[in-house]
Amino acid sequence: MFAALAVLAIVLLAFAAGFGTNWLLVHPLLAPGTAGQQDPEPFGIFWEVWHIVERDFYDDLPDGTQMTYGAIRGVLATLDDPYTSFVEPQPRELERQDLQGRFGGIGAWIEQKGPGVFSLTPMPDRPAAQAGVQEGDVLVSIDGSPITPETTMADVLASVRGPIDTTVQITVRREGTDSPLAFEIVRQEFEIPSVSWRLLEDEPSIGYVKLNLFSERTSGELQEALDDLLSQGATQLVLDLRDNGGGLLQTAIDVTSQFINDGVVLYEQKRGDEEKFYPVKPQDLITDLPLAVLVNGGTASASEIVAGAIQDRGRGVIVGEKTFGKGSVQFIYDLSDGSSLHVTAARWLTPNRHQIDGAGLAPDVQVTLTAEDRAQGRDPQLEQAVRQLQGQTYLSPTP
């Protein structure tokens, strides 16, 4: 089944709770030689093996890039850490765009209907539609590079996205047309919203804010959401962090600071270094507004930083299911070919020094959301959060 739906005008949200959650700190690449030189002798057995493979293997051999990437993945696997990882250039570019919160695209939905079959649905009044692309057109090539059965959704997105005001040429196959059709499309800027909000219909004094990702834009979007909800008369708030796989560390600190007026957001522990703490950056907007936070098994990393700080300070009630349990920090090193290396460099603790890594956060009020609930359009977790707010007395800080 290849019903994988993606969109060129909005974000592919965190790829999974083990990949998207790696985004915390970005560092420049270390200069050659600064990480310590290794004696080449231990690699002698590697080349011995490879020369035998070159001589005897019956099928095609990988090219130099494939061989290098494979070797990198192999050595990283020996670290037994799922978050220390190598990301190839195309997915790294998508990752970078998601964290920036904006990108250049053509304004079309893409649906993968089979191996190498990508169907387009243009958005009204966006560049693809204006150029003449029609719903159901199937991609044949992008900038002259053919679509093959091996082409992935990430390949397509990385090729069609690009710098704003630059041109991309796509060729499509259209039902009822004998020859392929070519279109030159000028990329337009699209913003990736990470925050959505509304007043609850049945409880108009309660504002609801959903955070999907911790990007560079999230703090400003959250400020806009809170301003709007307060202006509409919200006196209580539900913060939904369910299925938020994380993002940038600084954004997590900024978001926490919207709800807590002083103290520590988290502690960070590195190998051989003294413990470091990250303080609240006072905002004084809603630090006394009654608050409930929704979490589940997809709440990870930066989301756990926020929920953990709120829970430890007794600032609000945490409702839902146990969180994912990713309490480690990855440094992201951008490499010379556009790929990146994500390296686990530290672990973080909540303000009361609770370790989240591998353990997760236990909610104050456990509520399960079942598949049947989803099918019936029910949300018992949100309903419980509302009940908590209606009769809320603040919890004592977790010991």
Image (spheres, rainbow, N blue to C red):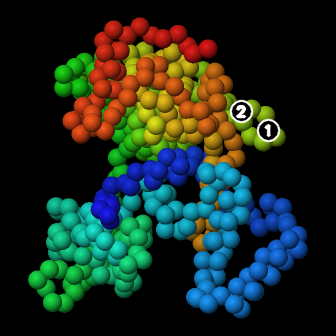
Counting from the top left corner in percent of width and height, residue 127 is at: 23, 68
Q: Residue 220 or 123: which is nearer the viewer?
A: 123
Label 1–label 2 contact, CB within 8 A: yes
Q: Is residue 296 above or below residue 39?
A: above
Sort mark 2 into few (<14), some (14-19) or many (20+) by Cα contacts within 10 Å.
Answer: few
Classify the position of the C terminus by image quarter.
top right
Q: Is residue 346 left or right of residue 245?
A: right
Q: Residue 128 or 65: which is nearer the viewer?
A: 65
- Res 45 → quadrant: bottom right
Q: Is residue 167 visible?
A: no
Given the image, on which type of amino acid does mark 2 rest? Lys
Residue wearing tag 1: 273
Q: Residue 319 or 163: which is nearer the viewer?
A: 319
Residue at mark 1 to residue at mark 2: CA–CA distance: 8 Å
The residue lying at 61 percent from left, 27 percent from top is 350
- Res 149 → quadrant: bottom left
Counting from the top left corner in percent of width and height, residue 376 is at: 21, 36
Q: Is residue 202 above or below residue 373?
A: above
The residue lying at 64 percent from left, 82 percent from top is 64
Q: Is residue 179 left or right of residue 222?
A: left
Counting from the top left corner in percent of width and height, residue 6 is at: 32, 60
Q: Is residue 151 left or right of residue 362?
A: left
Disc marking residue 276: 2
